Amino acid sequence: MIPCFSEKQRVVLRWWSSGSPHRDKDAIICDGAVRSGKTLCLGLSFVLWAMARFHRQQFALCGKTTEAVRRNLLASVLPVLEELGFSWEEKVSRNYFKFRFGGRENTFYLFGGKDESSASLIQGITLAGVLLDEAALMPRSFVEQACARCSVTGAKFWFSCNPEGPGHWFYREWICKAEERHALHLRFRMEDNPTLSEETRQRYERAFHGAFYRRFVLGEWTAAEGLVYDFFDTSLVQPVPQGTADRWIISCDYGTVNPTSLGLWGKFGEVWYRVQEYYYDAREEKRQQTDQEYAQRLRELAGDREIEAVVADPSAASFLEVLRREGWNVRKASNDVLSGIRLTADALKNGKIVICDPCADAIREFGSYCWDLSAGDRDKVKKQFDHAMDEIRYFVATVAAPEEAGDRFWAGFVERRV
C-alpha cells in the first residue's frame, strides 16, 4: 500500500521534477526530528529521480553500515517501489541492487561509512548520484569522497540526518552553507509524518530531555550544555521501600586508581530501586585495593541476598575473572555512553528506576556530572564524577531498559547509531 504523504514530504518527492521551483538545486538536505518521515520520502524520491533521469548508470546508497542501509532505508522504500511496479535484482555478496522500470535499468551500490578507512571503499567508482542516510554519523572523509564520485552530468547529492551539536562539521559545511552549495534544506518535525500517531509522538517527547529533546524532538542543532541529568534533584530521591524485593542485582564500575562504585538494586513490583552502594576513591583514601578486596566489598554489599547477576564494566577483565571464580553470575554491561544516558534519563523521569537515600555518592555525582564543551563536534561527558553514573548507566542499559515493553521503541533510534 502506497503511504499518505505530508506536504513537506511531497516537496521532497518532487523537488527535482520539471515543475518544481527547486529543480535546479544540486542537493537536498533533510534534517530534523526523529520519526519525522524524512528517510522514506528521501529514499523513494532518490530512486524515482534516478530511474526517471538515467539509464544504465551507477548510484550509491550510503549509511553507517550496509546493514543500516538495508534496515533503515530499503526496508521501508522497497515495498512502496513494488506497489509502483518497480522490479529489482539484489546481489547480496556484492552489495548492489539493479532496479528496472519502464525499460530503464540502473545499479545502486550499498556502502557503509563507519570510520575514516571507509572512504577507500567508495573511491574509484563513477556515480550519477549519492544518498547519504544519517550523514552526520559518517566521517567527513567518507561523505566528501562519496560526493566527489558523482561526476556524471546531472548528478545530485541527497542527505538525511538527525541533528548533532552546532560545532559538527556537517552542520557548518552543509546546513549553514546550503544556499552557497546550491542545496535545498528542509527541516522536519514529527508533525510532518502523517503515519505517526499522537500517542507515539507524545511518547517520544517524554523520552528525551535537555539537549536531546531539542535535537530529536524539536530538530535543532544545539549544544549539550551543563549537567547531563539537569532535571535530577532531591525530589526524585526516595527512602528504601519496605518489604522484600523480588529480584536483586549489583552493578559495578571498577577502578584501580579511579573510584570504584557498586550499586545494589532491588526490584519491588515494577520498579528497580538502588537501595545501597559501596564507593571507594583510592586517591582520596591514599590506598589502592586489590581485586580480592573489592570482591569482598561486593560480598558485604550483597549480604545474605540472592544476587541474580553482577553487571560490570566489560573492560574490568581481571576483576570479572575473580568474581567468576567466586561463583558470581557476571554480565558484561552494554557500554554505549550516549544511548545509555538517554535510557537512564527516561528511566528516572518515568519512575522505572529510583535512587534511594543511602546512595549519597550517586546523588552527589548526579549534581556534578557534566558535558564536556571542549569536545568539538561530538558529544562527550567529562571524565569526572562519573563512576556511579557509569555504573547506573550499565544497569539501566543492560537490565532495566531491555525489560521494558517499550524496548522496540528504543531500538528505533538507538540502533540507527550503530
Image: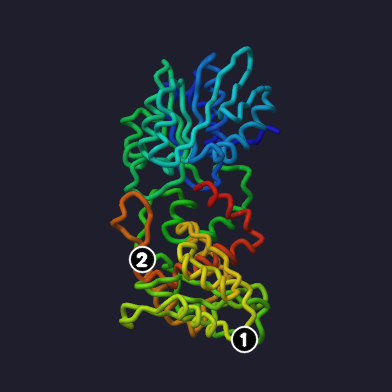
- Percent of width and height locating residue 385: 37, 71
Q: Which residue is mark 2?
A: 370
**At 50% across and 61% down in the image, what residue appears?**
340
- Quadrant in which the N terminus appears: top right
The picture places residue 48, in percent across and down from the top left corner, at 56, 24
Of residues 327 and 368, which is closer to you in this image? 327
Mark pair 1, 2: CA separation: 36 Å
Identity of the residue furthest to the front in this view: 325
Residue 226 shown left or right of residue 101 in the figure: left
Question: Disc 1 on helix, strand or loop?
Answer: loop
User: Mark 1 — residue?
Assistant: 304
Q: Check residue 373 in the rendering and tell me which mark sits there, or answer none.
A: none
Q: Amino acid at mark 1?
A: Asp
Q: Which is more foreground, mark 1 or mark 2?
A: 1
- Farthest-out residue, left: 374
Seen at 55% across and 40% down, the residue is 68
Q: Disc 1 or 2, which lies upstream in sequence?
A: 1
Q: Nearer the viewer, residue 304 or 353?
A: 304
